[in-house]
Image: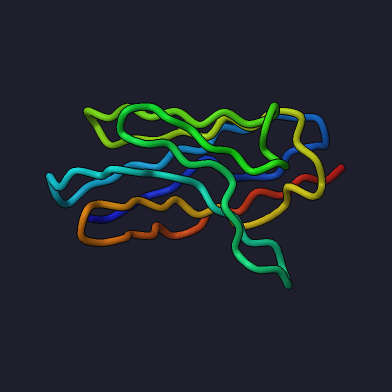
Amino acid sequence: VQLQASGGGLVQPGGSLRLSCGASGSAIRLNVMGWYRQAPGKQREMVAVITNVGRTIYSDSAKDRFTISRESTENTMYLHMNELKPDDTAVYYCNARSSIAEYWGQGTQVTVSS
């Protein structure tokens, strides 16, 4: 399974971005997909995850500002980010898990700065 993330960029504080992640290369069922991020000098952390039945979990920092969604038939996932803050600056990675393996995409840089 190959995961391709896109949609990062430079945005001003208070702005919005939408990240996309598409899975390809296999028909394997992806039970959980999610977004993680890693800021300079910090460990990678979970931002939001979504199951194949639509259950979602958010980190405290993402709750109420970010929305994760998924088109299960196409194994495509989105992260709508609103009210972005400088602390949201990081490389964002998409992740997927099947019953037998875990997959990571390449990161997409999100920079929140005026």
Q: Is 68 on the left or on the right of 58, as rendered?
A: left
At which x and y percent is residue 75?
28, 37
Q: Nearer the viewer, residue 103 or 23?
A: 103
- The residue at 33%/42% (across/down) is 22
Q: Is residue 76 above or below residue 44?
A: above
Q: Nearer the viewer, residue 86 or 48?
A: 48
**Most extreme residue toward the right, as rendered?**
114
- The residue at 73%/72% (across/down) is 41
Q: Is 52 on the left or on the right of 43, as rendered?
A: left
Q: Is residue 15 above or below residue 87?
A: above
- The residue at 42%/30% (across/down) is 55
**Most extreme residue toward the left, as rendered?**
27
Quadrant position of the C terminus in the picture: top right
Q: Is 71 on the left or on the right of 11, as rendered?
A: left
Quadrant housing residue 12: top right
Quadrant housing residue 90: bottom right
- The residue at 82%/47% (across/down) is 86
At which x and y percent is residue 49?
47, 41
Q: How is the image coloured?
A: rainbow
Q: Nearer the viewer, residue 21 or 33?
A: 33
At which x and y percent is residue 5?
43, 48
Quadrant housing residue 61: top right
Quadrant position of the N terminus in the picture: bottom left
Q: Is residue 83 above or below residue 33?
A: above
At which x and y percent is residue 59?
64, 43
- How many marks do you count on the picture? 0
